[in-house]
Image: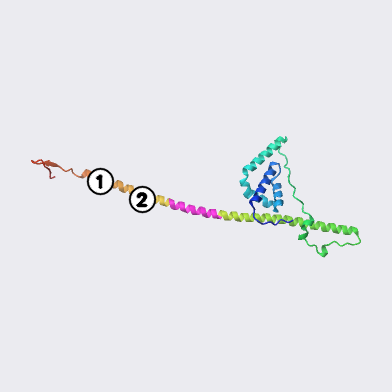
Amino acid sequence: MIKERQDAWTEENDLLLAETVLRHVREGSTQLNAFDEVGDELNRTSAACGFRWNAVVRHNYEKALQLAKKQRKQRQRALGQHQPVKKKLLYTPPVPSLDSFEEHIEVTDYEKPVINENPTAFSASITKAQLTIDQVISFLSTMQNRTSGVSALQKENERLKRENKEIAEANKALEQKVEQLEKKSLNIQEDYETLMKIMNRARKLVLFEEEERPSTKFKMDRNGNLEKVAE
């Protein structure tokens, strides 16, 4: 059956993908083998499962992945496998049969083998037709997987481009705000320094006037009253 699933990933799909990958890694299998199993379970391509794992799901299970790798090493050590061994496959993808493609292939009259009096010719005709159909099916399956994988990559690439553009615009807006705040801060600093200079100048001027101002002298008259002495 050709996989043509285009709907979005759900939390249950992500959980199934994470559990399957961790199980394969823990038991000595490969992540690619896990992607094959999840792809057949969810009717998705192995490439789409791999992309989903690396782009989204893996970030939430990094610690669990490291623990699974550690458990794999401990398991190998317990079995006496001190040297790295070839990883085993826990899942074997089903091989598509000719019957599963009957609804997608129409055999015309001239493609049908002709039964004649020569059994050998009839057998050769059947074998030739069978090989041709199998080759077409294999080619179409490969192209479908590649197309689905490329389509998923293109969609994810477009989404990342949009996010990158939004982040760049937000960053530019923040830079403009920071620049405005820096200008305001500089203006405030300059106003403060100008004010301090004016206050220091006024203080010095007051002190200078007090020093230059002559002191007033008084004298007492005969009645005991104080009167100002003319300078």
15 versus 71 height, above or below? below
**Horizontal placement of 29 versus 161: left or right?**
right
Q: Secondary structure at mark 1?
A: helix
Say which label, 2 or 1, has the lower sequence index: 2
- Residue 206's disc is 1
Viewer-side residue, 196 vs 29: 29
The magenta segment: 165-181
Residue 18: % across, % down:
66, 47
Q: Which residue is mark 2?
A: 191
Q: Residue at x 83, y 58 (%)?
A: 128
Residue 83 location, quadrant: top right
Viewport quadrant of the C terminus: top left
- Residue 144 is labelled as none
State the scheme by which the image is colored. Answer: rainbow
The picture places residue 221, in percent across and down from the top left corner, at 9, 41
Mark 2 Cα within 10 Å, few/some/many (few <14, many 20+)? few
Which corner quadrant of the image does residue 129 belong to? bottom right
Kindly give the residue lying farthest to the bottom in the view shown: 109
**Tag 1: residue type?**
Val
Determine the residue positioned at 66% across, 40% down. Answer: 69
From the viewer's perspective, is residue 193 above or below residue 117? above
Kind of residue at badge 2: Asp
Q: Secondary structure at mark 2?
A: helix
Residue 169 is one of the magenta-drawn residues: yes
**x then y, percent, for residue 55:** 63, 50
Q: 166 left or right of 214? A: right
- Residue contact at pointers 2 and 1, CB within 8 angstroms: no
152 in magenta: no
